[in-house]
Image (spheres, coloured by chain):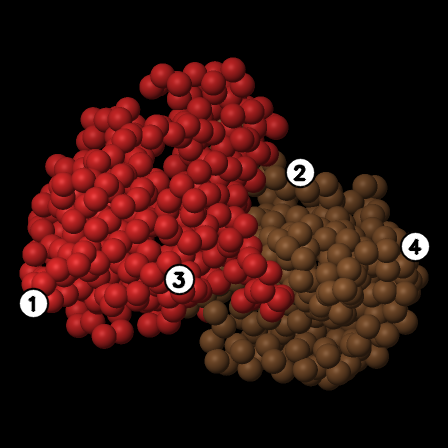
Chain colours: A brown, B red
């Protein structure tokens, strides 16, 4: 039993850390606004084989979820403006479609409609603004639809590449992946996969936000000393560490369970990790902005970029209350059930 | 990353579960709750008879002993079963310290009695004027002038607060001030003394959470030097051994698990479980419990690998105790007026948890002390006290 990454995993992590530090300074994040997509960064990730990582080995992937969350953690730390969680989660369903090779090498971007469509329209799909293939639950069918990426997103809180996508247009190609209960089940699994990846991304985001806050409090002086020397400030920062370590471990455990072939436990833990990470990322970025004082809310400072994404990235799934209710059903049985 | 439990540890978990199922009775749990004394001699001696106290904890410089991870699991299971284990935790902790730095006399006289379950230990650190600042202890121990050929005798005067279980304990580990004229950490000496020495008396202190603790008074207590633990003025070194020995292993932190289990049963029986708002809050508690379990496991794993967890213990303790308080308050709200009822049956455990939770952010290092540790040693912020 070991809660920490193995030596191999540490090597993976530091390789990604180096990559993102070099290739995704905060100027890249800013330049990618408002669409929230850096095409050059995506091409570089594709050159490293990242878009195919979640696929099976013979399709160009073979990474474990334990490895994927290390990648996503590092992407979250730098607010990488590429739809990794969305693409990697959706890619798993595209193995037997004509677009698998393109999805694996990154020439095609995939995105999951997390909520069921209404009259064939999937609203605010994460990654939808840049996606070539959208996976959606359309009535009782799980479909993959090849379409034109709009390359424009409605102005939004997180500067995320969201878009509404119509999934009944089959001009570019439309594949029915599953029907009926099987479709619902596989769509639920897709959501959990995305939740796991998003939890890892948010963990990286929160970790970096806390580091920024600590660094700022050591630099900023008031009353003749760094504000980080005051206990009132220290205690507020120290409070953030346990929850942060907690979501990192919980996400890792969820990934490990999925790798070990325990989908029920993995799914439950992924929802838990997602809900906890959503809350922790919010609290952490709120305090991180707060400890930057007035400068924290100015657009010139980077911490507001973290604050907005901490809220925007998870919220595309819907009101977290719905997830808490679903988790309760899973833990305690449905209302009126036996 | 590998979350698969070690087979030896799981085997030990099954063993302690079996032992608890066989030896722990509802009567014992009820008596502990009624009296506030979380120690049961029958249960304690039965456990001692298995050799688990004598085995102690494996560590650097110690041959044999239990994997710290096994002991973590041991207390985790005892806690989940609501077993009265405070005497056991105190005694195993003090036995570990005695083993490392006890005199030949302690090893011969006291240790076997701990191992056989004949005597338990109480902790005499806190005082009316020193809690978090434990090194400020003022209980005075002075050398009694006498023939240099004779064994020196120390005259002890003062009082210790929160000496839980001293009314059952054969021995109390006692932090004293032997030199008031040097920096506070350098003028301390530790003793392990029998509680029946003339001049030692105690008085019960009842707590909001139902625990009984004590104030222990020392009035001209003559303590022969053989009861000294460690060097003269070396009391702080002994403290450090005691704190390090514990390493986040002795005691169950995840009290939310038992609370959630009981509340879920109650809510199912009463129909409260159909309430969406209740379900959502219970799901939150379940998440906190999962996180607490992982954070509490971490220091035990580090100790098991031969390391010395420091901030990991602070992080776990802070999170666990704050989460328990959140859970207790939430359960109190959800149970409504029934949660106020303190009689056994119904939702008594809600009232109990709401009363019991606040002490957990105080004892074993307050939340503020834990945050200080985390701020300084994990976040690299300047020392602020």
* Mark 1 and mark 3: Cα distance apart in space: 27 Å
Residue corresponding to mark 2: A322
Residue at 14 percent across and 65 percent down: it is: B103
Judging from the image, mark 2 belongs to the subunit labelled A
In the picture of the structure, the residue carrying the numbered disc 3 is B181
SS at mark 2 in the image: helix
Q: Which chain does the residue under circle 4 lie in? A: A
- Could you tell me which residue is drawn at 34 percent across and 71 percent down? B305
**Residue drawn at the location 40% of the way across and 22% of the way down:** B348
Residue hosting label 1: B149
Is disc 2 surrounded by few (<14), some (14 to 19) or many (20+) residues within 10 Å?
A: few
In this rendering, the label closer to the viewer, 3 or 4? 3
Q: Are marks 3 and 2 in contact (CB under 8 Å)?
A: no
Rounded to the nearest angstrom, the CA distance separating label 3 from label 4 is: 69 Å
Q: Is residue B315 left or right of residue B179?
A: right
Please state if A277 lies on the left or on the right of B267 as rendered. right
Front residue of this view, candidates B224 and A198: B224
For mark 4, what is the residue? A155
- Indicate which disc, 4 or 2, sits on the residue closer to the N terminus: 4
Q: Are marks 1 and 3 in contact (CB under 8 Å)?
A: no
Q: Residues within 10 Å of mark 3 (few under 14, many from 20)?
A: few
Spatial CA span between label 3 and label 2? 64 Å
């Amino acid at each position: 039993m070991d809660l920490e990454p193995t030596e191999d995993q540490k090597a993976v992590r530091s390789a990604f850390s180096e990559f993102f530090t070099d290739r995704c300074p905060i100027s890249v994040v800013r330049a990618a606004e408002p669409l929230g997509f850096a095409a050059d960064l995506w091409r570089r990730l594709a050159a490293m084989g990242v878009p195919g990582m979640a696929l099976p080995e013979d399709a160009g992937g073979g990474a474990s979820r334990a490895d994927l969350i290390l990648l996503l953690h590092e992407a979250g730390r730098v607010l990488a403006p590429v739809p990794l969680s969305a693409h990697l989660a959706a890619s798993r369903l595209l193995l037997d479609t004509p677009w698998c090779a393109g999805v694996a090498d990154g020439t095609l971007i995939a995105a999951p409609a997390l909520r069921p469509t209404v009259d064939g329209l999937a609203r605010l799909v994460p990654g939808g603004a840049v996606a070539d293939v959208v996976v959606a639950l359309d009535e009782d069918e799980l479909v993959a639809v090849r379409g034109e990426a709009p390359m424009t997103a409605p102005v939004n809180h997180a500067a995320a590449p969201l878009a509404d996508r119509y999934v009944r247009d089959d001009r570019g190609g439309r594949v029915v992946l599953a029907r009926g209960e099987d479709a619902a089940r596989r769509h639920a699994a897709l959501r959990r996969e995305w939740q796991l990846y998003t939890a890892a991304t948010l963990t990286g985001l929160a970790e970096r936000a806390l580091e920024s806050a600590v660094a700022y409090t050591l630099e900023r002086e008031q009353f003749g000393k760094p504000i980080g020397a005051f206990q009132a400030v220290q205690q507020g920062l120290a409070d953030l560490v346990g929850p942060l370590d907690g979501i990192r471990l919980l996400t890792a455990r969820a990934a490990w369970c999925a790798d070990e072939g325990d989908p029920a436990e993995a799914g439950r833990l992924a929802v838990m990790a997602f809900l906890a990470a959503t809350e922790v990322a919010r609290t952490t970025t709120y305090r991180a902005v707060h400890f930057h004082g007035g400068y924290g809310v100015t657009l010139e400072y980077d911490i507001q970029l973290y604050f907005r994404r901490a809220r925007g990235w998870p919220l595309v799934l819907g009101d977290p209350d719905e997830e808490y209710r679903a988790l309760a059903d899973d833990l305690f049985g449905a209302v009126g059930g036996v | 990353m590998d979350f698969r439990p070690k087979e030896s540890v799981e085997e030990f978990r099954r063993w302690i579960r079996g032992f608890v199922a066989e030896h722990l009775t509802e009567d014992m749990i009820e008596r502990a709750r009624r009296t506030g004394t979380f120690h049961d001699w029958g249960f304690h001696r039965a456990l001692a008879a298995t050799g688990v106290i004598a085995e102690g904890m494996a560590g650097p410089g110690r041959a044999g002993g239990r994997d710290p991870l096994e002991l973590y699991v041991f207390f985790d299971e005892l806690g989940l079963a609501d077993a009265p284990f405070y005497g056991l935790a105190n005694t195993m902790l003090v036995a570990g310290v005695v083993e490392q730095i006890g005199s030949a006399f302690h090893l011969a006289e006291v240790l076997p009695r701990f191992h056989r379950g004949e005597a338990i230990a109480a902790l005499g650190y806190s005082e009316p004027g020193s809690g978090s600042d434990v090194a400020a202890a003022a209980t005075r121990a002075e050398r009694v002038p006498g023939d240099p050929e004779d064994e020196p005798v120390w005259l002890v005067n003062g009082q210790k607060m929160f000496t839980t279980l001293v009314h059952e304990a054969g021995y109390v580990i006692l932090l004293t001030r032997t030199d008031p004229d040097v920096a506070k950490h350098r003028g301390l000496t530790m003793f392990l003394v029998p509680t029946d020495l003339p001049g030692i008396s105690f008085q019960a202190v009842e707590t909001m959470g139902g625990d009984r603790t004590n104030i222990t008074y020392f009035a001209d207590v003559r303590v022969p030097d053989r009861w000294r633990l460690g060097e003269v003025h070396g009391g702080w070194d002994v403290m450090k051994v005691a704190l390090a020995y514990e390493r986040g292993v002795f005691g169950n932190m995840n009290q939310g698990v038992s609370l959630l289990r009981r509340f879920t049963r109650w809510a199912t029986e009463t129909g409260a479980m159909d309430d969406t708002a209740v379900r959502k809050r219970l799901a939150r508690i379940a998440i906190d419990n999962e996180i607490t379990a992982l954070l509490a496991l971490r220091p035990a794993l580090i100790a098991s690998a031969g390391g010395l967890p420091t901030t990991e213990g602070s992080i776990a303790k802070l999170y666990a105790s704050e989460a328990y308080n959140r859970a207790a308050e939430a359960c109190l709200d959800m149970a409504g007026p029934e949660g106020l009822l303190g009689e056994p049956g119904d939702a008594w455990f809600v009232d109990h948890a709401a009363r019991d939770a606040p002490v957990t952010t105080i004892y074993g290092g307050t939340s503020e002390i834990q945050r200080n540790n985390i701020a300084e040693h994990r976040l690299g912020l300047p020392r602020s006290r």
